[in-house]
Amino acid sequence: MDASRPYTVVVRVDGTPEGYAAAEYACSLCVKLKVSYRLIFLYVVALYRRTSLNLINRQTDQLNADIREDAENSMLKCKQFLSRFESLVAYEWISIKDEGNIGPIMVQFIHDGLNTPVDLVVVGRTVDTGIKKLVGGHVSDFIIANLKCPVMVVKNEYDLSDDEGGR
């Protein structure tokens, strides 16, 4: 690692207990680091691909509208969850939307979109949803296989009962 740049940690955060556990782990790690760091929370919205068939595209557009709406609600919950760490660590929030599966979208963004070397990626052990689950599998498996930096897979789930009212 170049001592002139911060230690860069990218965390895939989503509205799942596994995503919250990954966020909590990364914050705990950054608090303990003895070097400057850059903590980036990355929220990936994976949309269905459009085709050349208009009939199918109407259905795809409706599904994607639902995905976008669900993602907006989930992002609000994630930001609310992350606010508990604001006094402990500095972090950046990045959300990206693209067609395809979460793993490839995330890997592409880390390779081409950040314009900075990444020292560690932290992810929860989650699976793509819906049809994407059948072809995508575990997001963490794809990330491990396709990134050239260390990847920490957090298998624990964040215990939502620790929050007020179980939220």
Image (tube, helix red, strand yellow):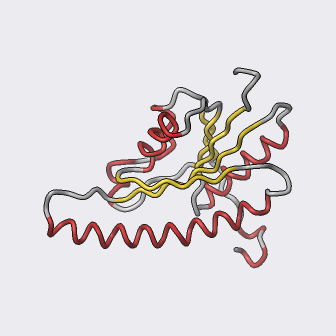
Horizontal relation, residue 20 to residue 101: left or right: right
Residue 46 versus residue 154 in the image, above or below: below
Q: Position of residue 70 (x, y in %)?
A: 48, 71
Judging depth in this view, the residue of 165 and 56 nearest the camera is 56
In the rendered image, which quarter contains the N terminus?
Answer: top right
Task: Work out which residue is located at the far top of the displayed protein and give it.
Answer: 2
Judging depth in this view, the residue of 20 and 117 nearest the camera is 117
Q: Position of residue 69 (x, y in %)?
A: 46, 73
In the rendered image, which quarter contains the C terminus?
Answer: bottom right
Instruction: Determine the residue positioned at 78% across, 67% down.
Output: 162
Number of on-image labels = 0
Horizontal relation, residue 16 to residue 32: left or right: left
Q: Position of residue 128 (x, y in %)?
A: 43, 55
Residue 159 versus residue 135 in the image, above or below: below
Q: Position of residue 78 (x, y in %)?
A: 64, 63
Horizontal relation, residue 145 to residue 157: left or right: left
Instruction: Determine the residue positioned at 52% across, 52% down.
Output: 126
Instruction: Determine the residue positioned at 41% across, 48% down.
Output: 137
Task: Work out which residue is located at the far bottom of the displayed protein and give it.
Answer: 165
Instruction: Determine the residue positioned at 50% across, 40% down.
Output: 113
Residue 134 versus residue 160 in the image, above or below: above
Which picture quadrant has residue 122? top right
Horizontal relation, residue 148 to residue 25: left or right: left
